[in-house]
Image (spheres, rainbow, N blue to C red):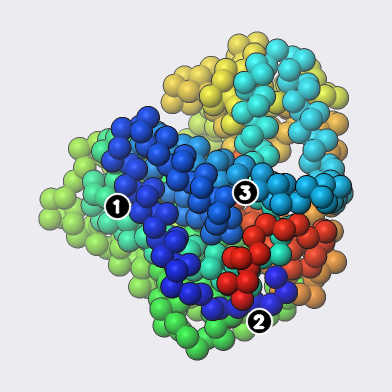
Amino acid sequence: MKDISVKMNKNEWLEILGAMIVLCAATLLPPAIAQISTAIFFVLFAFFKPFQSLVILVPYVIFRTLFIELNPGLKLIGDLITIVVLLRMFLLNTKKFKTWFHFKPFEYFFFAFLIFGAVIGYKNGVSLGAIVFQLRTFGVMYLLYYIISRSELPKNFLVKLAWVTVFSGAIIFVQGIVEKLSMRQLLMPEVWTQKILSSTNFVRIYGMLNNPNSLALVMFFAISAVFFLRWVYKDTEFKWSLRIAQVAFFGMLLLTLSRGTWIAAFVFVLFFMLIARNWQLLKKIGVTLIVSIVLIYLPVNWGVTFLQNLGVENTVAPDEISGGISNRFTETFSDDTLELMQESGRMFYIKKGIEVLKDYPITGAGFGTFGGSATLSYDSPIYEEYGIRSDIYGGKNFYSDNQYIQVIAETGAVGVLLFAGFLLAMVWMYWKERKTVFGQYLFGLWFATGVAGFFYNIWELKVYVLFYFILFGIFASMRTMYPMLKLCDYEKQKAE
């Protein structure tokens, strides 16, 4: 994909809409039937419409938490699509199998990191199931990068992804506003409405992802998609629709009260502007932020107060509900918050991670031992030894909420070097393309991701790495960084 096209035919949209209707309809079926029927449908869809199925992954992953809540039989659709498209690529390129193994330095560091963490974890008593689970978490979204970076993409692929992201963001926005005004009583699964939240968290919008931080990260990419579409359409077509979406998404980002995402977004803008020097864009961001506060953030909060005065209430709401943008930052350094962080929050995890490192300074304790995805589903063999109880985190094992302390505790000095090599080799690729807009965007995104890693297990957060690796893959494909592999000539030609 050397050029970007905005041309999309009706059938492409009908295929995407049809696939989403299948997903929504499947939520009404018994789980076993839903699992079998959607597996058959999406295996065929992914094989015969590989590029379209990659686009479908965006709304599926965004709404995956909701789909699974409504029907657990829809859990593995994303993995199925990814694997089937990858197998199709291999089948169509058997004569060029040597080109399958062309990798960049960051990939070699990544593979070494995964192998090392898995071997050490197994050596220290982690079950094979837990190790596979952790490898899947780290690796499945990389496979999207592998596929996309080596494919000659349809010229409208990036525009189509942007529109699907904007449409998904619009749905999230509407649901989020209703959730906020109804005090978490409408447009949510009943089990979510009954969730007990603290006073500081109750005022946040959890949305269709059931997590305000994940929602904020999606809004970040939705805002990026809007800016991209305004740029590609040169602010002519869909001008006001995109401006309205831009304000709405900024407003929703503020309403999540997600400090980590706000900080990461600020870092992105800072580093993007350092090399892009696009002051006109910075002005647009500033104006949109102010307008979103005036037209979205403040009116929605006033609306909540008004409805509370009319008697609208939630039976599981805390006695005192308070919080806003200023509160989110001031409460960070309050005595109560700092004490809680020491007892069971991020500082507690960092302290325990350092204890693990002291005992395993070179190799760490291995994957599946500390604060990662695997430890949420499988117990860790070292938690009892280090006095880490499941009941400190709502009756279940915990995320470390810090990617780096997890890497440090699980892989030690060797893993830290490998992980650093993975990250630095990536940013070097972006730096070499710093004169292009795409290179500038990914350069800023790399720093934002690095900062986000201090607040989240960012490389395990599916909805984030989905966007990251898709965009990285498109970047690599547009610059032909690998030998191109055939995936689907028919779809490519049709899109042109």
Q: What element carries label 2?
A: helix
- In the image, residue 362 lies at what x, y percent? 86, 24
Amino acid at circle 3? Val
Image position of 114 with respect to 478: above or below: above
- In the image, residue 288 lies at what x, y percent? 48, 75
Q: What element carries label 3?
A: helix
Q: Which residue appears at 72% of the width and 47% of the height?
A: 90
Q: Distance between the residues labelled 2 and 3?
A: 41 Å
Labels 2 and 3 touching (C-beta < 8 A): no
For label 1, the residue is 179
Q: Which residue appears at 50% of the width and 55% of the height?
A: 56
Labels 3 and 1 touching (C-beta < 8 A): no
**Can residue 436 be seen by looking at this rendering?**
yes
For label 3, the residue is 85
* Disc marking residue 34: none
**Can residue 443 be seen by looking at this rendering?**
no
Amino acid at circle 1? Glu
**Looking at the image, is mark 2 or mark 3 nearer the viewer?**
3
For disc 3, the neighbor class at 10 Å (few under 14, some 14 to 19, many from 20) is many
Amino acid at circle 2? Trp
- In the image, residue 142 lies at what x, y percent? 69, 46
Which residue in the rendered view is the most extreme toward the left? 310
Image check: 154 left or right of 237?
A: right
For label 2, the residue is 279
Mark 3 and mark 1 lie on one chain; the one further toward the N terminus is 3
Q: How far apart are marks 1 and 2 (CA)?
A: 36 Å
- In the image, residue 444 lies at what x, y percent? 70, 63
Q: Which residue appears at 40% of the width and 60% of the height?
A: 17
Image check: 166 left or right of 294?
A: right
Image position of 194 with respect to 204: above or below: above
The residue nearer to you, when weighing 83 against 91, is 91
